[in-house]
Amino acid sequence: MSLMIINQRRDQQVVGPARVDGFAKIRGAALYVDDVPAVDALHGATVRTAGAGGTLQEIVFDPAINWSEFVVVTAQDIPGINAIKLLENDQPVLVERAFRHAGEAVVLLAHADPEKLRIALKGVSLVELPNPDPVFDIDDALQARQEIIPGNIYADYLLDRGDVAAGVALADVVIDECFLTPSQEQLYIEPQGMLAHLQADGGILMEGSMQCPYYVLDALVQCLGMDKDHLRVVQSTTGGAFGGKEDYPSVIACHAALLARKAGGRPVKLIYERGEDLRVTPKRHPSRTLIRLGANKAGELQFIDMDFVIDGGAYRTLSPVVLSRGVIHAPGPYKCPHIRIRGRAVATNHPPFGAFRGFGAPQSIFAMEVAMDRLAKKLGMDPVELRKKNLLCTGDLSPTGDVVGKDCFAHAVLDTALEHTHYQQRREEYNAWNAAGHPTRRGIGLATFAHGAGFTGNGELHLASRVSLQALANGHVEILCSNTEMGQGAATTLVQIAAAALGLPMDSVHLAQTDTSRVPNSGPTVASRTCMVVGELIQKAAGQLLQRLRETTGLAQSYDVQGFAAACAGLYAAAGDALVTAHYHPPADMLWDEQTFLGRAYASYAWAAYVAEVEVDMLTLETHVVDFTAVQEVGKAVHPVIVQGQIEGGVAQGIGYALYEDVLWNDRGVMANDRLTNYIIPTSADLGFIQVVLLEGGLGAGPKGAKGVGELPMDGPAPAIVNAIQQALDIDIQQIPVMPEMLLRLTMREGNS
């Protein structure tokens, strides 16, 4: 299969249609949740637990405050089930007695005056019987001396293929390492927030910042005990999410709805300020990975043995899903006859961790890719040579036992990355620079990896996604789906796919506002599935619409905008409507065993090789990324500008993960550096030059062979950067972020200067 390379030069400009949401945002006309007008609205606020788990004994209201002026909600006001609907009903909407972490919601307050509300928050005291011995460490949780749940295990998965003991016997060189990755905050533009309106018929309209409106709808149904027909969830403009607005909006929506039910018909706006958002909402799962790799003298992998554990926090939320993806991606894009990956998600007294771009894969891929460099060093082999010997090819067995098809570009992305970065030449130049005793050290490192797009295995089948197209009498077409635009460009990409499939200009196609009263459930906006899965459904629906127009109105094979509009008008006259719906059907060869983790896990994998070039100041031990090259095979770049932006954004977050972002916890397990002044993320001055090279193999499961893009860019930056630092300083690094303090300890221990 030949590959097309686009955006291969630094001065090359990629092109694509203008973003359909761009002008409204540039002009300031886009309404984020706090901008949505609400006449006579009340402001909501939350009273939270202080201890890291324990028992609520009493709620004390200051008698000096006139509480009749306030809307006050406690667990006793919940008409339905006091649990947030997700994978398991273990997380309460409001604490009634037992709680598991500091910051759990107990009392909700609302008032028209924000200043009076702030005073009232201080007037509510919680009498708590605290947990005397909270658990915050992964290995402490595994030992289960203090149990939060039985055994402190939310999920325990095993990918076991071959015989690791036999692989150990065949290995001439073995490494045994431990790697740690931290939590990471998504840091979306506008904090979490919801606006609840009580309707005249007793129903509730919920507007807010979210990724998954139907998650919110299901949570409201359970909490309020109401029928879906009396609930309506509408997404307002969402300024970024990255997974952080997948499950937590359900919590805020339930809180806002409960306040609205008692507010006498007045709307309630519940918007978090930044510090509250940072302290209580989910972040990336921290991880601990024990890894053993073995190879023969030729560098051929004989076994991969990993014990991968993530901190799930105080409630299960999405931890099993994150763990599953981490386990599947842990062995990397390598062929190996003997593989054992054990993955566990443990309970601690931290606030729950959740989805964040890549969800699980960045943690396990970090361990595998840094370990590959360690193995190469012990073999006396170049890291590139080791990878080339072991990268998957068509016909090989994947780590999950599936036969690798023609859609395998592991070697192609690596070869392209080496060529574009002049990798071997740079490595030699940097070795010479470092030997010359300059005040800085330079290094170049790489990572090769793949990422599956869409839900794992049978997940897409269970979702049963639907997308509708509504042709209007004027010849315009409206896309009806529940997938959300949250800054990633989905609105433009989906319109572009529909317009291309219908042979219409983009201004004839519109994406309907995400409103559960109008749009079908096309699944959540997660897991790099929007373009690939939902885009393919839009393309199928477009085919259905054209067929219906031809059968009913005689639309010609070749038509212009006016001819299409005339056919739509004719369809309305004949049938009274012009709505078609496409339903998801899995690929015929999609066979996956959820118990053994064997089979075909994803409809499509995207492939990548990332190369990082770094410079370390030996006086301050600050690391600067001076150059970064991201080579990605994406199937088909539907909108190259958006694809490039996705990759650049993911690389920026990955650089932050590797070097800057350090969540600090206080003694109650709550984020201590909960401000943008002390939670440090990279700015444009810290990123260096990011070169994106897109390869198109055209074999993905999406429109014209497209694959998912959004998750993959998060997987590679951290290991590539760490491998570059290790080459520059000749040290071993076990964890990120690689702060100057860590390098000082390591260089002093190794006797380097």
Image: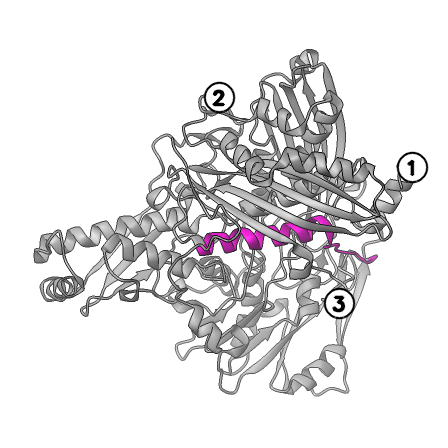
Name the residue located 53 percent from the left edge and 42 percent from the top edge: 631
Question: Reading the chain from its start, which is encountered first: label 3 or label 1?
Answer: 3
Q: Amino acid at mark 2?
A: Asp
Q: Secondary structure at mark 3?
A: loop
**On the image, numbered disc 2 is attached to which residue?**
396
Q: Secondary structure at mark 2?
A: loop
Q: Answer whether residue 567 is magenta in the image.
A: no
612, above or below 342, in the image? below
Name the residue located 69 percent from the left edge and 39 percent from the top edge: 444
Question: Horizontal placement of 464 versus 33: left or right?
Answer: left
Q: Quadrant of residue 573?
A: bottom left
Q: Answer whether residue 651 is magenta in the image.
A: yes
Question: Reading the chain from its start, which is encountered first: label 2 or label 3?
Answer: 2
Rendered location of residue 428, percent (x, y): 71, 34
Graded by Cα atoms within 10 Å as few (under 14), some (14 to 19) or many (20 or more), the crowding at tag 2 reads: some
Rendered location of residue 375, percent (x, y): 71, 25
Q: Which residues are magenta?
A: 641-667
Graded by Cα atoms within 10 Å as few (under 14), some (14 to 19) or many (20 or more), the crowding at tag 3 reads: few
**On the image, numbered disc 1 is attached to which residue?**
751
**On the image, numbered disc 3 is attached to which residue?**
677
